[in-house]
Amino acid sequence: MSGPAGQLKGRAARLARLMPSGPSNAARTPFVLLVVLLLGGGLITLLLLNSALNEGSFRLSELKKRTTEFTDEQQALQHDVDGYSKPDALERRARELGMVPGGSPAFLKPDGTVRGVPSEAAAPPTPAAPRQTQQAAPPPPAAASPTSTASVTGSPSAPPATKPSTSAAPPAQPRTPANQSSTSPGR
């Protein structure tokens, strides 16, 4: 027995027979390619996953910003509503509209009798406000031609001029079951 296996004895000799004695690059190439492909695929997958998470993060921050804006707008509107619904604001607005506080109320009992004495609402004296007078447009002359009527009625306070119709068509009559034509194919 010659070679390195001949010099070893026992267990070492058996292990040396299992191991190839020369360099073998052909067996390592597919393994190295497999490891490189797995690492490359993992890196690409991580890159895609990271991009998707970043996109979701940007969308989430945009939605949070819009939610904050809408919340601020809702609070401002609620503040306006609260201001308009205060009793003094309601009373002032009612007086601007010409409303007055009601008189004493009367109530109906279940048996139909009236409880209380109803009274009419009395308007408190209001200070006399200066009235503004509006100038009315002079009426157009009766014997004017249609073209002169159109030029006179071009003012904003006058009604628009209508053009006289020259056709002699009779006015349209409303449809009644007697003068309606049948459009159904079965009749």
Image (cartoon, rainbow, N blue to C red):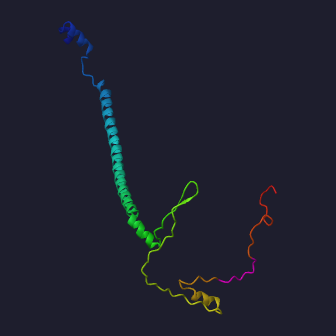
In this view, 24 is above or below 181:
above
Residue 162 position in % (x across, y down): 63, 82
Residue 41 vs residue 97, the one in the foreground = 97
168 is within the stretch colored magenta: yes
114 is within the stretch colored magenta: no
Name the chief secondary structure element in magenta: loop
Residue 183 position in % (x across, y down): 77, 60
In this view, 61 is above or below 104:
above
The extreme left residue here reads 7
Residue 90 position in % (x across, y down): 42, 66
- Quadrant containing the C terminus in the rendered view: bottom right
Q: Quadrant of residue 49?
A: top left
Q: Which residue does the image show at 42% across and 80% down from the upper left?
A: 127
Q: Which residue does the image show at 74% across and 76% down from the upper left?
A: 171
Residue 83 vs residue 152, the one in the foreground = 83
What span is colored magenta in the figure? Answer: 163-170
In this view, 99 is above or below 2:
below
Residue 70 vs residue 184, the one in the foreground = 70
Q: Which residue does the image show at 73% across and 81% down from the upper left?
A: 167
Lateral position of residue 137 relative to residue 186, left or right: left
How many circles with numbers are drawn on the protein?
0
Residue 155 position in % (x across, y down): 54, 85
Q: Quadrant of residue 8?
A: top left
The extreme right residue here reads 187
Residue 101 vs residue 168, the one in the foreground = 101
In this view, 82 is above or below 34:
below
